[in-house]
Image: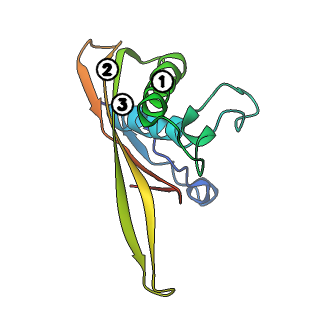
Amino acid sequence: MSAPFLRLPLNCERVIEGDNLEQCSLKDSIENHVKLILITKFGENRFNLSYGCEVWEFDFQRIASFNAWRDKIVVSVKESIKSNEKRLYEVMVKLVVEDEEAINSSKKTVVVRKRLRFDITAKLKLTGSSINISPTLYISPFSVD
């Protein structure tokens, strides 16, 4: 599955030095794009205001109904991948949400954040084969694993 796809983040310094940009496989390219969709808030991409997902609409907010919140996130991610990642079809998204405690040793405090573990399966339009992507996001405060 190797092809001339560019690895993110782009290292433009390599081009200035006369080297080529790093390349990656089709699978890596799709994984990188899905992660970019997940960490982008709607309206953040000025060329496509519907690019991104709804995760960031609820960050740091009280959630009245956990199941409704989780279902909204799943639908948002699925629809965004379907509309923005044209190399995939039959996209399915599952989400497991867990609380995680992290200790800030410098401030001697405990921070509780939500871990969002996605299980995304789809088929490649090019070959019809299945692909599985399992990104993890931490929100409140945000970080990516």
Label 2 neighbour load within 10 Å: few <14, some 14-19, many 20+ = many
Return the x and y of residue 44 as percentages of the image width and height. 70, 39
Q: Which residue is mark 3?
A: 26
The quadrant the C terminus occupies is bottom left
Q: Distance between the Cα atoms at labels 1 and 2? A: 10 Å
Outermost residue, front side: 64
Between 11 and 87, the one lying in front of the other is 87
Of 52 and 112, nearer the camera is: 112
Residue 81: mark: 1
Q: CA distance from mark 1 to mark 3?
A: 16 Å
The percent position of residue 108, horizontal first and vertical second, equals 46, 86
Q: Earlier in the sequence, mark 3 or mark 2?
A: 3
- Please give left or right for residue 98 compared with residue 59 in the image: left
| Residue at 44% over, 22% down | 78
Across and down, in percent, residue 97 comes to 36, 44
Mark 3 secondary-structure assignment: helix
Tell me which amino acid carries mark 3: Leu
Task: Tell me how far mark 3 sits from mark 2, CA to CA.
Answer: 14 Å
Q: Quadrant of residue 18?
A: bottom right
Left or right: 81 in relation to 135: right
Local secondary structure at mark 2:
strand
**Circle 1 SS class:** helix
Residue furthest to the right: 46
From where the camera sits, is residue 53 visible? no
Q: Residue furthest left?
A: 129
Is the residue under label 2 in contact with that under label 1 (CB below 8 Å)? yes
- Type of residue at label 1? Ile
Asked if the residues shown at circle 3 and circle 2 are in contact, with their CB atoms under 8 angstroms apart, the answer is no
Q: Residue 122 has which mark?
A: 2
